Image (tube, grey):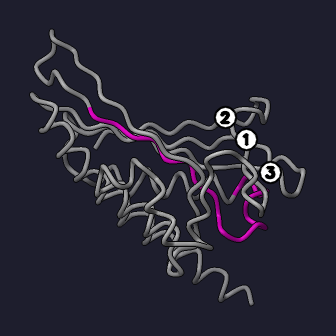
Amino acid sequence: MRVKLRLEFDAEPVGLEIPGDGGESGGYVNLRENPGAIEQIELARLHRPLRGLLVALNSADSEFASVACRTWTKEDAGAAQASEFGSRVDMIFSGQKHNFERSTYVSLAEGLRELLERESGAGTLAAEVCVLRCDYRGSRRSGYALRLILAGRGGTPAQAELRWGLGVAHLQQALLFLSRAVRQQKARAN
């Protein structure tokens, strides 16, 4: 899989707002507090791989939480792999402390890039791992978030979505692996 790493530290923290504990941002659903709310997310109902990723990210076994997601399709009639299906998932650490540590996000992004680059599908799967500055509305502080962009390409829309789904499965495995590593680091620190 082709993976691009992007670090956006100089940008103003207005690109992404993280809702406070009350979820006052329109459309935000806190899946850690209410796992059954996955049914309220239309994209999760339409795309099973995305649903699985969101459930895993927000589970008790994960050190992460999702903030937002979206999907898209593109057609390029002149290309051999004419169809693209893609997604974007924005995520943070479930423990607030790490969300204000730049080095923790950089380490997470680099580890994720390394794990994803080991996967096959260089011509049909592309990922972008971005560390973004953002505003945490609940604490009124600037911090960081991770944006995961994944796109699958294929000769047909169905083939592109299938390849994307396989890429999402790899992404989910990599994130759960990194979550275990974070948990082990926290245990050693205590």
Q: Residues within 10 Å of mark 2 (few under 14, many from 20)?
A: few
Contact, mark 2 vs mark 1 (Cβ under 8 Å)? yes
Circle 3 is placed at which residue position? 136
Query: Is 52 or 36 nearer to us in this picture?
Result: 36
Q: Amino acid at mark 2?
A: Glu
Position in image of residue 15 (x %, y %): 70, 33
Q: Are marks 2 and 3 in contact (CB under 8 Å)?
A: no
Closer to the camera in the image, 48 or 109: 48
Which numbered disc flags the more N-terminal residue, 2 or 3? Answer: 2
Per the image, is 91 magenta? yes
User: Which residue occupies 30% across, 56% down?
Assistant: 49
Q: Is residue 84 left or right of residue 25?
A: left
Q: Residues within 10 Å of mark 1 (few under 14, many from 20)?
A: many
Question: Between residues 58 and 111, which one lies in front from this camera angle?
Answer: 58
Q: Which residues are magenta?
A: 85-103
For the residues labelled 2 and 3, the Cα–Cα distance comes to 16 Å
Instruction: Identify the residue under disc 2.
Output: 8
In which image quadrant can residue 114 be found? bottom left
Q: Which mark is residue 133?
A: 1
Q: Position of residue 136 (x, y in %)?
A: 80, 51
Residue 104 is left or right of residue 48, and the answer is right
In this rendering, the label closer to the viewer, 1 or 3: 3
Label placed on residue 154: none
| Quarter of the C terminus within the rendering | bottom right
Query: Three-letter amino acid code at disc 3?
Result: Tyr
Query: The residue under label 1 is which amino acid type?
Result: Arg
Gap in angstroms between the C-alphas marked 2 and 1? 7 Å
Asked if labels 3 and 1 touch by Cβ distance under 8 angstroms, the answer is: no
Q: Work out which residue is located at the far front of the displayed protein and give it.
A: 40
Tag 1 secondary structure: strand
